[in-house]
Amino acid sequence: MARSPFLDRLHGSGPPLIMGILNLTPDSFSDGGRIRAVEPALEQVRAQVRAGADLVDVGGESTRPGAQRVPAEEQKRRVLEVIRRIRSEVSAELPVSIDTTLWSVAGPALEAGADLVNDVSAGRDDPAMLAGVAEAGVPVVLMHMQGSPQTMNEAPRYADVVTEVTDFLVERARTARKAGVGEDSILLDPGIAFGKAPSHNLRLLRRLDRITGLGFPVLLGVSRKQYIGDLFPELPPQELVPATLAATALGVWAGVRVLRVHDVGPNRQAADSVWAIREAEEGSAPG
């Protein structure tokens, strides 16, 4: 099987990749219900590409705190046609990620044109997921979450959040490898705001180097999230872009390879600026 061009960019020496978020759900925390029809979804993807997105993450099930599960058939109804038409009408090359924890959704999404799987359960929700990903030969994102979206913010507890999240990700990467997933096809996500109190999120961000140091590409999703909102309780999620950019900059400095964001243009600018500064310090920037 030919190596995915996405993997070449992921493991290359260029700037971090910007993943645009496409929520095809009525109840996502930040933009729920805004994009539910195919044509507006395609226009959002076009706008994200124009703004500098390197890939898009398409999801048909919200993972906000307290969100209820969405059956596989409904997830497929929401996402498959959009993925097909991204391929046929927007770009044949743009990497598309399917955001789901079910192989019965991920498999058809890959057949429709998706290139990778973003699984917030890290392969725990569906025993078929990791084997399916391995057989398909596609990359997978493995995320840390304490509990489930229904329960994750009910008094999360850690003795040492950085060590526990790191150990979990190491174990899930090992499990994926045993299932046959290629080592270079595994991405790790610390799961900011998934089963973590605000203080836990801040500690994880402060020590992202522990996770980027594991040897796998790291995906970071901090866009407009509630832990930022706790710092600025008077602001709605849509007005938390400057705070998101600060976390994006921190992630790039720590070596994060993929930033999952709502606001592609500002995050593209922030990521590229910090990457250039980081590379200049290493002595590899031109000029």
Image (cartoon, rainbow, N blue to C red):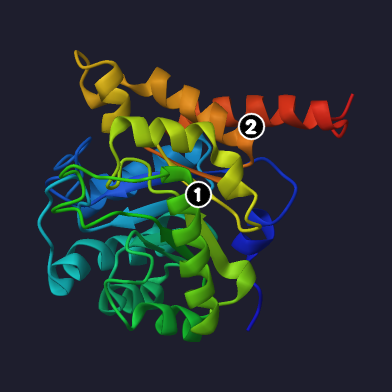
Q: Hey, which quadrant is residue 261 in on the image?
A: top left
Q: How far, Cα to Cα, is label 1 from label 2?
A: 13 Å
Q: Earlier in the sequence, mark 1 or mark 2?
A: 1
Whether 115 is drawn above or below 130: the answer is: above
Outermost residue, front side: 159
**Where's residue 180, x and y in %?**
54, 84
Please state which of residues 109 and 91 is positioned toward the viewer in this rendering: 109
Q: Is residue 64 left or right of residue 276?
A: left
**Where's residue 119, x and y in %?**
36, 63
> SS class of the residue under badge 2?
helix
Q: Is residue 6 left or right of residue 114?
A: right
Who's the residue at 45% across and 78% down the image? Answer: 133
Q: Is residue 54 left or right of residue 286?
A: left
**Mark 2 crowdedness (10 Å alpha carbons): few <14, some 14-19, many ≥20:** some
Who's the residue at 63% across and 63% down the image? Answer: 7
Please state which of residues 214 and 262 is positioned toward the viewer in this rendering: 214
Whether 187 is drawn above or below 56: the answer is: below
Q: Hey, which quadrant is residue 80 in on the image?
A: bottom left
Q: Quadrant of the N terminus?
A: bottom right
Which residue has dot 1 on it?
A: 219
Kindly check if marks 1 and 2 are in contact, taking CB atoms under 8 A apart as contact: no
**Mark 1 crowdedness (10 Å alpha carbons): few <14, some 14-19, many ≥20:** many
Please state which of residues 155 and 84 is positioned toward the viewer in this rendering: 155
**Which amino acid is tagged 1?**
Leu
Please state which of residues 30 and 164 is positioned toward the viewer in this rendering: 164
Whether 110 is drawn above or below 40: the answer is: below
Which residue has dot 2 on it?
A: 253
Q: Quadrant of the C terminus?
A: top right
